Amino acid sequence: MWRQFYAGMDVKLPLFAMGVFIAFFVLLLLRTYAYKRSQDFDGVAALPLADDSLPPSNRRSAAP
């Protein structure tokens, strides 16, 4: 099936699409790991894991 799809197509379109994907992926990795935004990460890391302001009757229990 894929041979029929690519039979009349020029090879440049799939290579261009793969190049765009790789470029986007590399930019995403650079944005994630290269830019050290510790102030953003520290704020998220300081968020509480449980909401202690709710009374015990309104909290969800871990056991069903």
Image: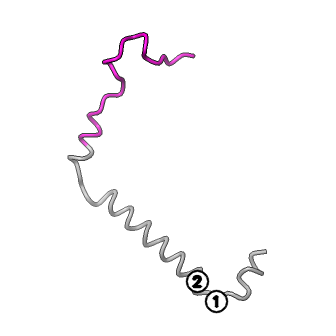
Q: Residue at x 20, y 46 (%)?
A: 39
Report x, y in % for residue 4.
77, 81
Kind of residue indicated by mark 2: Leu
The residue beneath circle 1 is 10
Q: Residue at x 28, y 60 (%)?
A: 34
Q: Residue at x 64, y 89 (%)?
A: 10
Q: Residue furthest left?
A: 39
Q: Residue at x 57, y 87 (%)?
A: 12
In the rendered view of the protein, which quadrant contains the N terminus? bottom right
Crowdedness of circle 2 by 10 Å Cα count: few (<14), some, many (20+)? few
Q: Quadrant of residue 59?
A: top left
Stretch of the chain drawn in magenta: 42-64
Q: Is residue 52 above or below residue 31?
A: above
Kind of residue indicated by mark 1: Asp
Within the magenta stretch, is there residue 49?
yes
* Dominant SS in magenta: loop
Question: For the residue labelled by badge 2, is the local secondary structure a helix, a strand or a loop?
Answer: helix
Q: Is residue 15 above or below residue 27?
A: below
Q: Are marks 1 and 2 in contact (CB under 8 Å)?
A: yes
The residue beneath circle 2 is 13
Q: Quadrant of residue 27?
A: bottom left
Q: Quadrant of residue 5?
A: bottom right
Q: Is residue 7 above or below residue 45?
A: below
Within the magenta stretch, is there residue 55?
yes
The reply, left or right, for residue 56 in relation to residue 45 is right
Q: Is residue 57 above or below residue 62?
A: above
Nearest the eye: 38 or 48: 48
Report x, y in % for residue 52.
32, 18
Question: For the residue labelled by badge 1, is the local secondary structure a helix, a strand or a loop?
Answer: loop
Report x, y in % for residue 26.
40, 67
Nearest the eye: 58 or 9: 58
Please count the marks in the image.
2
